[in-house]
Image: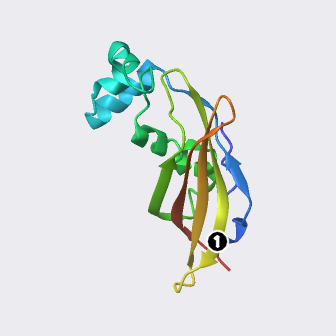
Amino acid sequence: MSLRAEQYWLEDFTPGRTFPGPAHVLDAEAFGMFAKMTGDAHPLHYDAEYAKKTAFGAPLAHGLLLMSMTALGATPLSNNVEDSMVAFLEQGGKFLKPVLLGDTVTPSMEVEEARPTRNPGNGIVRFAVRLTNQRGEVVLAGFHTYLIKRRAA
């Protein structure tokens, strides 16, 4: 029997609160699964000989693969908002350093803002999202915005 995770509501998201995710090795299987889902088969991502001739020198992770790894579901937080999540509203990000085949990335989400909306039952939570590599370098920095329910009175 598994225990249900504690549920978080708008009031539980205070600026500065951080939700780390687990590390992921970006191996050929991960690159291949992403290509299968998206159809992006550019040789920069899969062909080692092709990639050696580029500025990166090795197969490069897809930008959208990296962005997807900052998703709420990439952290244990997803289990904590099963009752309060209304919608994913917005995202954005910048790629700061290349991520190559074999690199390990770790996501984290930090609450930047939590505020009520005009609808008294909901609020907006904006997270700063980051991916760091195995050397502790931030390789992606961005944001996500969610519509979250307020705790029932």
> Which quadrant: the C terminus?
bottom right
Tell whether 135 sits left or right of 147.
right
**Along the line of sight, the residue nearer the viewer: 150 or 53:** 53
Per the image, the residue denoted by label 1 is 114
User: In which quadrant of the rendered view does residue 50 lie?
Assistant: top left
Can you say whether 97 is above or below 85 in the image?
above
Q: Position of residue 149 (x, y in %)?
A: 57, 71
Q: Position of residue 21 (x, y in %)?
A: 64, 41
Identify the secondary structure beneath mark 1: strand
What residue is rendered at 69% in x and 65% in y? 13
The three-letter amino acid code for the residue at tag 1 is Ala
> Which quadrant: the N terminus?
top right
Residue 104 in view here: yes
Q: Residues within 10 Å of mark 1 (few under 14, many from 20)?
A: many
Residue 9 in view here: no
**Along the line of sight, the residue nearer the viewer: 115 or 31:** 31
Can you say whether 102 is above or below 128 in the image?
above
